[in-house]
Image (cartoon, rainbow, N blue to C red):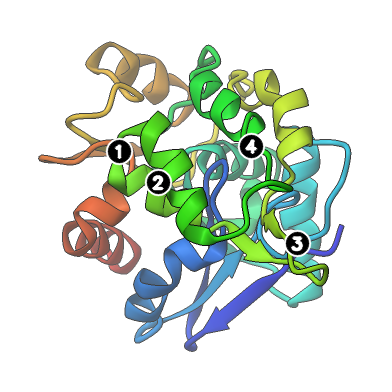
């Protein structure tokens, strides 16, 4: 699987993995900030952005994709940062290749099972007939009427592009995501990873609850938790400076 990636800076390598429906562009600003001290690699996960498409979407293959990218870029030892879906990939990779991971950073996701919670978004996207939508304004109006959250609408508009036939198309593989959405929420193994780990959560997000933390510490015994205040699931976008500083201090400590 060929993954699209961008590289910034020099130093100890840090690979950044986005969440479901995301792409590497979501992390460009932060990547450039960390690149003053680190070699930062942002990645489009399979079926997202400019990376190859596949009929398969699960954590085993996504882990293997990143492992292959490490080999391709000649990066035997890296730190990992993953948000949401990307965070589960990062955890799984650290569990299976602990000798190759320097630091693990997980943003607003835990190792537990999560029920499908993107159903409304998926239903909206699947009901959007891109054959009939002729302008980005029409697309924006369609999404705004159904999602009613400007930030979410703008996030999805970034994923729309004009293909060679002059028609709008999604950067992500919507059909495969819909077919495999249950696999995105599944729990990862309870295999213990003893490397240094940082979990970050938004205090307005339900993804990492106080009751989850003891279980997380069993699997990741050398872990710490930072709560970013007035932030939800997209804490890295909502509180960029706080997120930058927390990650930077952890990588430098």
The Cα–Cα distance between marks 3 and 2, rounded to whole angstroms, is: 23 Å
Q: Secondary structure under badge 4?
A: helix
Residue 39 - label: none
Residue 215 falls left or right of residue 52: left
| Quadrant of image for the C terminus | bottom left
Q: Residue at x 63, y 37 (%)?
A: 92
Residue reaching furthest to the left: 229
Q: Which numbered disc, 4 or 3, marks the residue that appears first in the sequence?
A: 3
Q: Are marks 2 and 1 in contact (CB under 8 Å)?
A: yes
The Cα–Cα distance between marks 4 and 2, rounded to whole angstroms, is: 30 Å
Residue 51 - label: 3
Residue 232 falls left or right of residue 123: left
Q: Are marks 4 and 3 in contact (CB under 8 Å)?
A: no
Q: Residue at x 59, y 23 (%)?
A: 123
| Residue carrying label 1 | 149
Residue 42 x/y as whole percent: 56, 68
Residue 10 to residue 75: above or below: below
Q: Secondary structure under badge 1?
A: loop
Residue 245 x/y as whole percent: 20, 64
Residue 213 x/y as whole percent: 31, 20
Q: Are marks 3 and 2 in contact (CB under 8 Å)?
A: no
Mark 1 or 4, which is nearer the eye? Answer: 1
Mark 4 or 3, which is nearer the eye? Answer: 3
Mark 4 or 2, which is nearer the eye? Answer: 2
Q: Secondary structure under badge 2?
A: helix
| Residue carrying label 2 | 153
Q: Which numbered disc, 3 or 2, marks the residue that appears first in the sequence?
A: 3
| Residue carrying label 4 | 92
In front of the other: 200 or 97: 200
Q: Are marks 1 and 4 in contact (CB under 8 Å)?
A: no
In front of the other: 16 or 220: 16
């Amino acid at each position: 699987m060929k993954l699209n990636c961008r590289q910034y800076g020099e130093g100890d390598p840090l690979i950044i993995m986005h969440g479901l429906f995301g792409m590497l562009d979501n992390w460009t600003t932060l990547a450039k900030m960390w690149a003053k001290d680190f070699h930062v690699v942002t990645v489009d996960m399979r079926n997202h952005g400019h990376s190859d498409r596949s009929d398969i979407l699960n954590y085993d293959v996504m882990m293997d994709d990143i492992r292959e990218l490490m080999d391709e870029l000649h990066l035997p030892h890296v730190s990992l940062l993953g948000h949401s879906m990307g965070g589960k990939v990062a955890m799984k990779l650290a569990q299976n290749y602990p000798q190759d991971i320097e630091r693990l950073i997980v943003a607003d996701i835990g190792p537990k099972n999560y029920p499908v919670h993107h159903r409304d978004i998926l239903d909206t996207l699947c009901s959007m007939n891109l054959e009939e939508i002729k302008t980005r304004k029409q697309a924006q109006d369609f999404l705004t009427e159904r999602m009613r959250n400007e930030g979410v609408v703008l996030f999805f508009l970034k994923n729309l592009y004009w293909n060679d036939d002059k028609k709008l198309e999604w950067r992500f593989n919507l059909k495969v995501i819909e077919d495999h959405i249950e696999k995105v929420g599944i729990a990862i193994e309870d295999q213990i990873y003893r490397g240094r780990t940082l979990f970050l959560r938004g205090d307005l997000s339900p993804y990492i609850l106080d009751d989850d933390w003891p279980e997380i510490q069993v699997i990741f015994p050398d872990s710490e938790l930072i709560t970013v205040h007035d932030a939800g699931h997209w804490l890295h976008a909502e509180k960029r400076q706080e997120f930058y500083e927390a990650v930077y201090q952890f990588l430098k400590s």
